[in-house]
Amino acid sequence: MTDADVARLAGWVGDGGVVVLSGAGLSTDSGIPDYRGPSGVARRATPMTYQEFTGDPVARRRYWARSHLGWRTVGDAGPNAGHRAVARLQELAAVGGIVTQNVDGLHQAGGARDVVELHGNLAYVTCLRCEARTSRHELEHRLTAANPGFDPAVRTVNPDGDVALDDEALAGFVVVDCDLCGGLLKPDVVYFGETVPADRVRRAFDLVTAARTLLVLGSSLTVMSGRRFVLRAAKEGIRVAIVNQGVTRGQPYAGLVVDAPLGAVLPELVRRVEGPTAA
């Protein structure tokens, strides 16, 4: 990172009309691990798929047992300086829209408004039959009541809010179903193999195509779910800026890339956009 890079980025952001596209790298300073960034460690090759979750009762039990222990890593996390900086830029009217690939709700916790959560929010659970949406806290109480004394040793916490456990620790874990209709409960997030709801995608594209700058924060853009917005911005002649640690697949389309920690860059960006007269 150079001062010239940050100054140029501040100029772009200060122009207004910025849409933020955020990824897991924005939340690592909040203690939430990622899969691909510099803080990532060796983990499963792929997370749970929708097909596996809905079609395999054993896999579903394994998921809920692990998630019951691990989701608090996400649920108890607080916003960091990067989240608060994005919210401040929105308050200053520099940022006009936020699209996130994260499921942690930390943009909102940091003060941001009207966030498009592409992949849902881990703090909620949905029924696959009646579509009722309920709080993850409510499910936590039900699972605790159904599994008294369940407290095995945790080996690793995964980015999607579950943990690595030895298989023998999962024996006897009881999964609960929807208490309204008896249907299967699923975290209100988009799994691998599942389609992002069309209205979310449409809203995100509308924000991007109306932007002056697409600012990518903390995403490797490995998955097309996020990279497609960079491709659309480049096609439409919209400026693309990326702040991320390490290489991203969006670099060929970016007019500006800052390879640096977001916790350092974003507060400095706010300071420069606010200007010397800010209180």
Image (cartoon, rainbow, N blue to C red):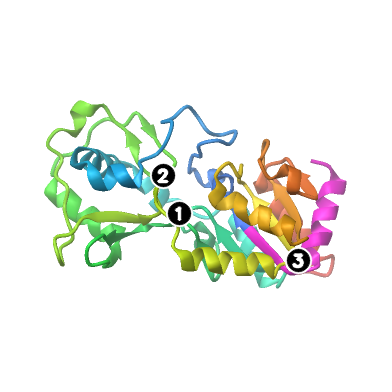
Q: CA distance from mark 1 to mark 3?
A: 26 Å
Q: Which mark is residue 67?
A: none
Q: Which mark is residue 212?
A: 3
* Residue range (magenta): 1-20
Check disc 1: other Cα within 10 Å, few if <14, some if 14-19, many if 20+. Answer: many
Hey, what amino acid is under mark 3? Arg
Q: From the top left corner, tell me how far across and down residue 218 is, in percent.
A: 62, 46
Q: Which mark is residue 160?
A: 2
Q: CA distance from mark 2 to mark 1?
A: 8 Å
Q: Is residue 89 visible?
A: no
Which is closer to the viewer, label 3 or label 2? Answer: 3
Quarter of the picture containing the N terminus is top right
The residue at 54%/71% (across/down) is 114
Q: Which mark is residue 103?
A: 1
Q: From the top left corner, tell me how far across and down residue 60 is, in percent.
A: 24, 43
> Circle 2 sits in a helix, a strand or a loop, which is it?
loop
Q: From the top left corner, tell me how far across and down residue 167 is, in percent.
A: 23, 28
> Residue 212's quadrant in the figure?
bottom right
Q: Is residue 225 visible?
A: yes
Asked if labels 1 and 2 touch by Cβ distance under 8 angstroms, the answer is yes
The residue at 66%/71% (across/down) is 91
Relative horizontal placement of residue 68, taking residue 84 as reference (left or right):
left
Hey, what amino acid is under mark 2? Asp
Task: Say which of 125 and 153 sits in front.
Answer: 125
Check disc 2: other Cα within 10 Å, few if <14, some if 14-19, many if 20+. Answer: many
Hey, what amino acid is under mark 1? Val
> Residue 177's quadrant in the figure?
bottom left
